[in-house]
Amino acid sequence: MARSRTLGINVIDLFAGPGGLGEGFASFANEVGRRPFCIRMSVEKEASAHATLTLRAFLRQFLEKGFPPEYEAYRGGEISREALYAAWPREAVSAYAETLERPVELGRDNTLIRRRLRKILAETESDPWVVIGGPPCQAYSLVGRSRNRGKRGYRPENDERNFLYREYLGILARVQPEVFVMENVRGILSARVHGERIFGRILEDLEHPGEAVHATGARGLEYRIHSFVVDKPPTELEWEDYLIRAEQFGVPQSRHRVILLGIRSDIELQPRVLERSDAVDVRDVIAGLPSIRSRISRGGDSPGAWEYAIRECVRECRGCVSADVYHVMIEKERELDGELPIKASDYPWVEPTLGGGIPSRLRAWLAGQSNRLDGHVARSHMPSDLARYFFAACWAAARDGISPRSDEYPAFLAPDHANWESGKFADRFRVQAWNRPSSTITSHIAKDGHYFIHPDPAQCRSLTPREAARLQTFPDDYHFEGGRTRQYQQIGNAVPPWLARQIAEIVYGILG
Ligand SMILES: C[S@@+](CC[C@H](N)C(=O)[O-])C[C@H]1O[C@@H](n2cnc3c(N)ncnc32)[C@H](O)[C@@H]1O
């Protein structure tokens, strides 16, 4: 087949999740407004994330001409996904081609991946390639490691997830891209296999992927592994230099991840590093969203039952919490007099509102192209958690955003947990402070919302998927497929697209 130029930079997104990293590349526009990066293949095994990726790949084809009205109808629940795709069949086919038609598992479905690779590599001639994405991190992550330690007979060297990065190396050896970007959790820097820290070996493998996977056609393939934040040649870098603190780059979230920039050794260039920007805080990105109260999960939800749970909490706290916190509680309780100021979470579809404090470029980014947004729906909580959330948020309001430690809760709010009184559970319940970037949005948010309590005591709830998505800097027009748990998982797993966009700009500086 004749190979032709596509006039773009080809991107392969591996372990793509909902496409946070890919979104940064696909949406980056250069100085003349052209989008140079073209995602040619994304690989993702989880069905909902795959559906999210496909929908976004579909939508991206409308960036210039404006999103089709059917998209809004789909997000509003008025038409099915099949009807959306049937209205735009050509775009749907192209989106599915990009995401390989179905969820695909690297390591298992390699024949399908190889077939697609052969096709896309044959279609382009001299255009550069970029491989992005990071192998899954459970085995490296600190939480994962402490959990694994408790598993009988667990040996990290037998955990295949530790070696999924070999699949990544295999694709590097095959595609031989000019650049790769590999993301992982901070724990990769200290993870050990056979008692040895594996990060050094991972770096060596990434420097010589052909040799690492014994690919004869890629023996001489070499990469230099640069940092996105420390402007030094690779030989002078410390491992910690690969750590990116997202909050230093305009993301309203403290998120620390290892992100490696591999540049093929024939490209002799020291890339520039990310430029720091002012901190953006929680208030900036979520305060403008409609206030919604939580619902009650057991015993039936009603405005009366909700109000009763709060009033009972205030009553029980009298005399057993300090005056400054109690003062906030009383003030909040007073707001309940008369009609309840906020409704239950029945806002699947609302007008987007962005706070005045957001820097203008980030504002335009978050607003996206839609004038409605979805996913602003709170989960339900047990009345006991409702009271804990109310107490914790009032405490944080009185104490500059600091959450109470477990030994600072009144006894009646103690959960049924053996070690609660030790005071060690400083973090069991965490209120996200208005005036700081949030803590890391993780996929854990799908399990319980205790770490992600909304700072407004009157709302008494954990963050909605849309709030989590805003803290992760997904544009408001980004739709996450699947039920709420799946949505939270996808959002928590992603690279913040706003950070990804800045990373894409650096890669463009190398190849553009
Ligand atoms: C940390 S997330 C990736 C996030 C993504 N880079 C983003 O920015 O949105 C890792 C993803 O890898 C997927 N995954 C794990 N093992 C996989 C495999 N063997 N093949 C394909 N996908 C896999 C998981 O389902 C998960 O969505």
Image (spheres, rainbow, N blue to C red):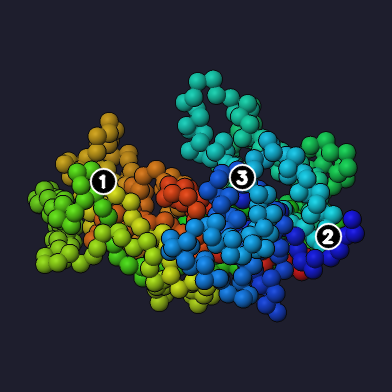
Give the labeled residue for mark 3: 103
Task: Residue 113: give x, y in percent of width and height.
Answer: 73, 44
* Residue 227, placed above or below residue 506: above
The residue type indicated by label 3 comes to Pro
Figure quadrant of residue 23: bottom right
Mark 3 Cβ inside 8 Å of ligand 1: yes
- Disc 1: CA contacts within 10 A as few (<14), some (14-19) or many (>=20): few
Identified at 50% across, 27% down, the residue is: 149
Residue at the image point whose x is 16% and y is 52% from the top: 305
Q: Position of residue 4 (x, y in %)?
A: 86, 63
Residues packed near mark 2 inside 10 Å, few (<14), some (14 to 19) or many (20 plus)? some
Residue 282 sits in which quadrant? bottom left
**Quick check: 209 above or below 370?**
above
- Front in this rendered view, residue 319 or 493: 493
Q: What amino acid type is highlighted by mark number 2?
A: Thr
Per the model, the C-alpha gap separating discs 3 and 1 is 33 Å
Q: Looking at the image, can residue 414 be seen? A: yes
Disc 1 residue: CB within 8 Å of ligand 1: no
- Which residue was labeled with disc 2? 124
Give SS at disc 2. loop
Question: How far, Cα to Cα, is label 2 from label 1?
Answer: 55 Å
Q: Residues within 10 Å of mark 3 (few under 14, many from 20)?
A: some
Q: Which residue is mark 1?
A: 297
- Gap between marks 2 and 3 measured at Cα: 25 Å
Disc number lying in front (2 or 3): 3
Horizontal and vertical percent position of residue 485? 43, 47
Question: Residue 214: x and y, percent?
Answer: 83, 35
Please give left or right for residue 281 compared with residue 132 in the image.
left
The local secondary structure at tag 3 comes to loop
The kind of residue tagged 1 is Ser
Q: Which tag, 3 or 1, sits closer to the chain's start? A: 3
One can see residue 442 in this view: no
